[in-house]
Image (cartoon, helix red, strand yellow):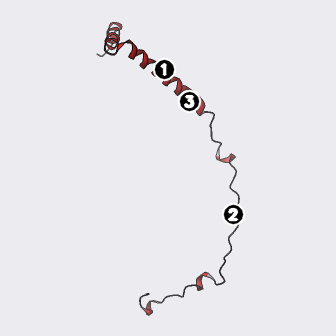
Amino acid sequence: MFGLSPIHLLLLALVVLVLFGRGKVSEFMGDFGKGIKSFKEGMNDDTSHVVPPASQIAPPAPVAPVQATTSQPVNEAVPPHSPSQGPVS
């Protein structure tokens, strides 16, 4: 149904060449080739930056515990509120 014979492809190429000119077509194809080359180089460079598995990563250093600096325990710093005393202001 939509088969393109060599004659159709040649006619299509001729129409594109007439519409855009030889300079634009060659410039486009050159840029297309540079893009493919850059893509291939990027794919090859990507394999050299492999992240090591989690089993090879060193665990973080332990953190020393923090001591309280107040003289009063935390639960005695604020007096408790009972519901029978009314709203807190």
Mark 2 surroundings: few (<14), some (14-19) or many (≥20) residues within 10 A? few
Q: Secondary structure at mark 1?
A: helix
Which residue is at a point 63% across and 41% down the rendered structure image?
51
Q: Earlier in the sequence, mark 2 or mark 3?
A: 3
Mark 3 surroundings: few (<14), some (14-19) or many (≥20) residues within 10 A? few
Q: Secondary structure at mark 2?
A: loop
Cβ atoms under marks 1 and 3 closer than 8 Å: no
Q: How many numbered circles are shown?
A: 3
Locate the N terminus by quadrant. top left
Mark number, residue 43: 3
The alpha-carbon separation of the residues under discs 2 and 1 comes to 55 Å
- Mark 2 vs mark 1, foreground winner is 1
Q: Amino acid at mark 1?
A: Gly
Q: Position of residue 25 (x, y in %)?
A: 39, 16
Q: Give the left or right position of residue 3, taking residue 26 as reference.
A: left
Mark number, residue 17: none
- Mark 1 vs mark 3, foreground winner is 1
Task: Quadrant for residue 15, please give it.
Answer: top left
In this view, the residue in front, 34 or 1, is 34
Q: Position of residue 2 (x, y in %)?
A: 30, 16
Q: Give the left or right position of residue 67, taking residue 3 as reference.
A: right
The alpha-carbon separation of the residues under discs 1 and 3 comes to 15 Å
- Identify residue for label 1: 33
- Identify residue for label 2: 63
Rendered position, 50 above or below 88: above
